[in-house]
Image (tube, rainbow, N blue to C red):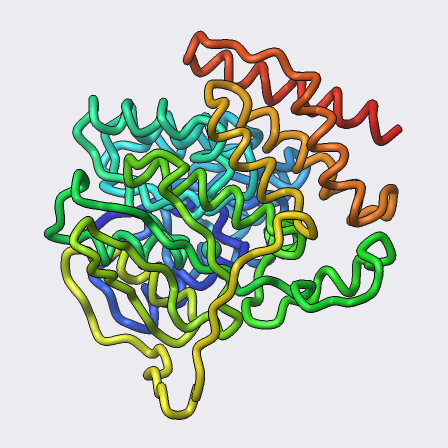
């Protein structure tokens, strides 16, 4: 039986993961769960999965949960704050940690899990974008595996099984394009409501805005480069509005291998949990004659400047992706709070990156410092 910890259990990936474990009657034991503040969802999950520890980021909510556990005679360790995530990540008698928290907050817990020799299922692209090469080196040193949960990266992973990394010519990362690839009005007029309505995927707010600016795809290009050990120049982005073909790998002989399925996150989540096994799933079978056509076209780097910024950050390397990611997190939050316009997101990220002095130390502290600095700098720009 596989024993797992789910960090971010009330979010979109977290709840789908627990649904799969339950519905598929998988041989998986849930040892730990974490939420930011949604203790109502957590209470239901505690009753269903009986974990031995949980963490609630919000301290006041963690105290309410503790009282609830006592009055319901539930024996459970309740942690709080960022250190709570690390406590869960280090729990003994756990084989895998699913990192489904959003943003750079997942960095320290991912590292804690790797250092305590647990396999990682990673749904958090910010962590890999900000400190990917550091994390992959640490994973190799500790002899653990990092399984992608992102649909594109799960596709690439599947296209690489049994192949040699040195024979990859390029990775072709598909992008649905989000709501605006055919938008003909001025991008500066885009409202929060428009940006939050994604045509194919139902996701959390931060990633939905990133999908609208295509920063999500930029972060995914960095993520792919890190996970599969190829330079970012060999990662090509292609628009594919049907979201049926989840990515491809082209090999040196000209063969292109792709993975296709109905767009449903339950599939990549399940595969990360069961690899190398495949189990039957509830995902709608792919009916290509019903889909009719699969379209592909080049992305517009002028309309979506976040793409170019991501490639620039990846090429500069070291702390630049960390600074870019932090500035983006701050700018997206400001856009959601209606402090800035849609087009200001890329402007703030770009200005922050230009002001950033790269540190070449390659230590955890240098990534965290860059993140901290960029957050303050971006915040100042917004104010
Ligand atoms: Mg994705």
Residue 362 is at least partly visible in this image: yes
Residue 14 is at least partly visible in this image: no
User: Foreground: 110 or 233?
Assistant: 233
Q: Left or right: 11 with respect to 340?
A: left
Tell me if residue 206 comes above or below residue 319 in the rendering: below
Q: Residue at x 71, y 34 (%)?
A: 330
Q: Residue at x 76, y 36 (%)?
A: 347
Q: Residue at x 48, y 30 (%)?
A: 314
Which quarter of the picture shows residue 205?
bottom right
Q: How many marks?
A: 0
Residue 7 spot, x, y in % from top left: 45, 43
Q: Left or right: 202 with respect to 225?
A: right
Tell me if residue 361 comes above or below residue 314 in the rendering: above
* Quadrant (top left, top right, bottom left, bottom right) of the N terminus: bottom left
* Quadrant (top left, top right, bottom left, bottom right) of the C terminus: top right
Q: Residue at x 49, y 74 (%)?
A: 242
Name of the residue lying farthest toward the left: 162
User: Foreground: 171 or 40?
Assistant: 171
Residue 229 spot, x, y in % from top left: 28, 35
Residue 153 spot, x, y in % from top left: 36, 52
Residue 261 spot, x, y in % from top left: 34, 74
User: Foreground: 45 or 219?
Assistant: 219
Tell me if residue 11 comes above or below residue 291 in the rendering: above
Tell me if residue 233 comes above or below residue 297 in the rendering: above
């Amino acid at each position: 039986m596989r024993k797992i910890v789910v960090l971010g259990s009330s979010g979109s990936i977290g709840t789908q993961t627990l649904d799969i474990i339950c519905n598929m009657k998988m041989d998986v034991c849930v040892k730990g769960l974490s939420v930011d503040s949604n203790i109502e969802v957590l209470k239901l999950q505690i009753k269903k999965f009986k974990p031995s520890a949980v963490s609630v980021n919000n301290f006041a909510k963690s105290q309410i949960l503790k009282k609830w556990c006592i009055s319901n005679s539930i024996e459970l360790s309740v942690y709080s704050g960022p250190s709570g995530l690390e406590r869960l990540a280090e729990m003994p008698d756990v084989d895998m940690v699913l990192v489904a928290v959003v943003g750079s907050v997942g960095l320290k817990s991912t590292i804690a899990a790797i250092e305590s020799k647990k396999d990682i299922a990673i749904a958090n692209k910010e962590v890999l974008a900000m400190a990917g090469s550091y994390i992959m080196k640490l994973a190799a040193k500790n002899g653990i595996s990092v399984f992608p949960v992102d649909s594109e990266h799960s596709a690439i992973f599947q296209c690489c099984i049994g192949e040699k990394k040195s024979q990859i010519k390029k990775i072709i990362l598909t992008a649905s394009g989000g709501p605006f690839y055919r938008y003909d009005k001025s991008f500066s007029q885009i409202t929060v409501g428009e940006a939050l309505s994604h045509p194919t995927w139902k996701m959390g707010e931060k990633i939905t805005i990133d999908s609208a600016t295509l920063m999500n795809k930029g972060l995914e290009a960095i993520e792919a480069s890190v996970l599969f050990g190829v330079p970012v120049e060999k990662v090509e982005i292609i628009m594919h509005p049907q979201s049926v073909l989840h990515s491809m790998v082209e090999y040196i002989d000209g063969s292109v291998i792709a993975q296709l399925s109905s767009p449903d996150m339950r599939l990549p989540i399940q595969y990360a949990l069961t690899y190398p096994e495949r189990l039957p799933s509830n995902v709608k079978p792919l009916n290509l004659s019903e889909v009719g056509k699969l379209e592909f076209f080049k992305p517009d780097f002028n309309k979506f400047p976040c793409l170019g910024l991501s490639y620039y950050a990846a090429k500069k390397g070291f702390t630049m992706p960390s600074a870019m990611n932090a500035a983006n997190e701050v700018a997206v939050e400001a856009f959601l709070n209606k402090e800035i316009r849609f087009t200001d997101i890329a402007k703030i990220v770009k200005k922050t990156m230009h002001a950033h002095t790269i540190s070449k130390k390659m230590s955890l502290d240098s990534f965290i410092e860059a993140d901290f600095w960029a957050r303050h700098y971006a915040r100042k720009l917004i104010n």
